[in-house]
Amino acid sequence: MGVGEMWWNVFASKACQFLRALGSVMVLIVLGLVGLTYYTTVSLVYGPLAGTDTNDGRFATAVLVIYHVLILMVLWSYFACVLTEPGKVPDGWTPPQEDEEAALGKSNSEKLRRFCRKCSAWKPERCHHCSVCGRCVLKMDHHCVWVANCVGAYNYKFFLLFLLYTFVATVFDAVVLLGPFVDFFRDLEASSHGYSGGGHGGGGGGGGGGG
C-alpha cells in the first residue's frame, strides 16, 4: 500500500465517522425546521383566528386541520425511514453456484457470487457496502445524512413518502402563509414611513418654536 492510498483510507475513515456523527445533528435540524413552521403557522398566524364564527375563523380552522394532517404524515414517514432497518444481509447467506466461464464476461456487479472483503461475507444482488454504516445493505440506494440511515430495501418506501409529504406540506404552507407575510411586510413598511413622517414633522415644529 502506497503512502497516498494510506492517507486516502485515513481520510475516508474520518469522513465516515463525521457523517455518522452528523446524522444525529441532522435529525435535530429536521425537527427544528418542523417546529419553526409549526410555530409560525399555528401559534402566530392561524391559531388565534381559529374557532371564531367568521369567514377568517372558519378558513383558519380548515388550514389548521389540513396542516396537522400533513405534519403528522411527514413525521410518521420520517421516523419510519430513520428507525426502519434498511436491509441486513441474513447471517450465513450463500449465493448459488455460478459457471466460471459465464462469469468471465460480466462485471463484478452482475456476477451472482460477490464477496465483501470488509464484511467478510457474500453479497446478494444489488447489495452494496456502506462505509458510513460499516456493513452491507440490501438494495442500497444511498446513505442519507438527513435520516441518519441508509436508504435500502425495507425503508425505501418510507423515504419516498417522506419526500412526497414534505413537498406537499411545504407547498401548502407557502401558499397559506403568503398572504399574511405580504400583509406583515406592508404594515412594517407603512409603520416605518409613518415613523419617518412623524419624525420630520416633530423637527419642523421644534424649529418653529425656536423662531
Image (cartoon, rainbow, N blue to C red):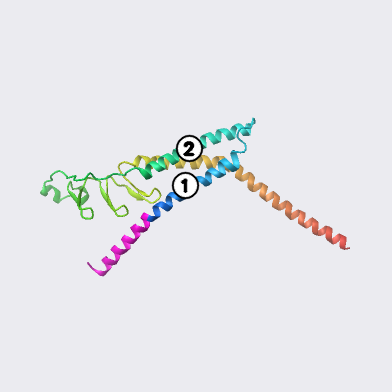
* Camera-nearest label, 2 or 1: 1
Residue 138's image quarter? top left
Give the residue displayed 73% in from the left and 53% down from the top.
195
Disc 2 to disc 1, C-alpha distance:
15 Å
Task: Give residue 45's position: percent from left, percent from top.
Answer: 60, 41
Bounds of the magenta span? 1-20
Give the labeled residue for mark 2: 70
Say left or right for 186 vs 127: right
In the picture of the structure, the residue carrying the numbered disc 1 is: 31
Residue at point 40% right, 43% down?
A: 79
Q: How many neighbours does mark 2 have within 10 angstroms: few (below 14), some (14-19), or many (20 or more)? A: some
Of labels 2 and 1, earlier in sequence is 1
Can you tell which quarter of the image residue 93 is in?
top left
Query: Which residue is at the far top?
Result: 53
Residue 102 lies, in percent from the top left, at 13, 47
Q: Is residue 185 left or right of residue 96?
A: right
The quarter in which the N terminus is drawn is bottom left
In the picture as drawn, the residue positioned furthest to the right comes out as 211
> Which label was assigned to residue 77?
none
Q: Which image quarter is the C terminus in? A: bottom right
Number of other residues with Cα within 10 Å of mark 1, as a class: few under 14, some 14 to 19, many 20 or more: few
